[in-house]
Image (spheres, rainbow, N blue to C red):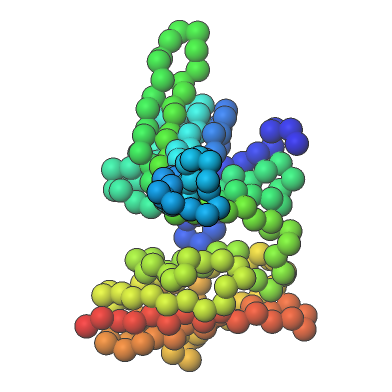
Amino acid sequence: MWGIGTRFQVLKNGSWDDISGIKSITPPGMTTDMADATVLFSETNTDGVEEKQPTLHRTGEATLVLLFEPGNEKQKDFLQNQRGRNKLTVRILYPDNANYYQFDGYVSGFEQGDITPEGLLETTVTFTSSGAPKFGDTAGIASTKLESLVIDGVELTPAFSPNERSYFGETDDAKNELHYALVDQGASAVATINSLPADNNADLNWVTGEDNYLKIVVTKDDAETIYLVVVKHNE
């Protein structure tokens, strides 16, 4: 597959934002530590050959090389997220506009290149990934699924996946903002918090010291998918 048409996207307020001006993308890799598992006596290893056992998976770094536009707020947001130590969810959307490679990570580098009379302004953004990356296929997701689900300030457990229906979270805030996006724009979604209507891109008001129940029902034709998030409010 030719690389032209590949996009880099950042999940923000429940939607995927395209980053413009990308010259190249280096995805993060993964390596696995190996521990020495050789023992003094083994009936299965009589030749004195060392044996190994896999242990910790280590994720690597990703880099973006951008044609830097000083007025581009999305590009400049990388520096702000680095300073704020904010974890981002990002993905590389391949040219078929269906398959993607997604990972979470932190901006660990924001470096502007040399400014010369004959050259263009360039910036290199480095991400240090955190957690397991994954491949996905937007075309394979049913039309009654959410593409993304975010409650500002609340970490969902498990991490959001369109095929995962139930989540848990905690908050100390009186309210947090809800953001979600549909895979199929022809579908519809109805959200409720503790059986009361809840709007997308709006605050969820919590019952103090109680478990709060967010329910999102996505429908299209005769199909239906229900997502449930239990958010515990800490007094």
Residue 155 in picture, x, y percent from top left: 39, 67
Q: Can residue 106 be seen in this view?
A: yes
Tell me: 26 left or right of 108: right
Q: Which residue lies furthest to the right in this view?
A: 221
For the point 74% across and 59% down, which residue is it? 139
Q: In this view, does 134 lie above or below 109?
A: below
In this view, the residue in front, 108 or 174, is 108
For the point 70% across and 32% down, which residue is it? 4
Q: Is residue 10 visible?
A: no
Quarter of the image with the C terminus is: bottom left
Q: In which quarter of the image is residue 60?
A: top left
Q: Residue furthest top?
A: 117
Q: Is residue 11 above or below residue 1?
A: below
Residue 26 in picture, x, y percent from top left: 54, 34
Quarter of the image with the N terminus is: top right
For the point 37% across and 69% down, which residue is it? 154
Q: In which quarter of the image is residue 115?
A: top left
For the point 50% across and 33% down, which residue is it? 64
Residue 40 in picture, x, y percent from top left: 40, 49
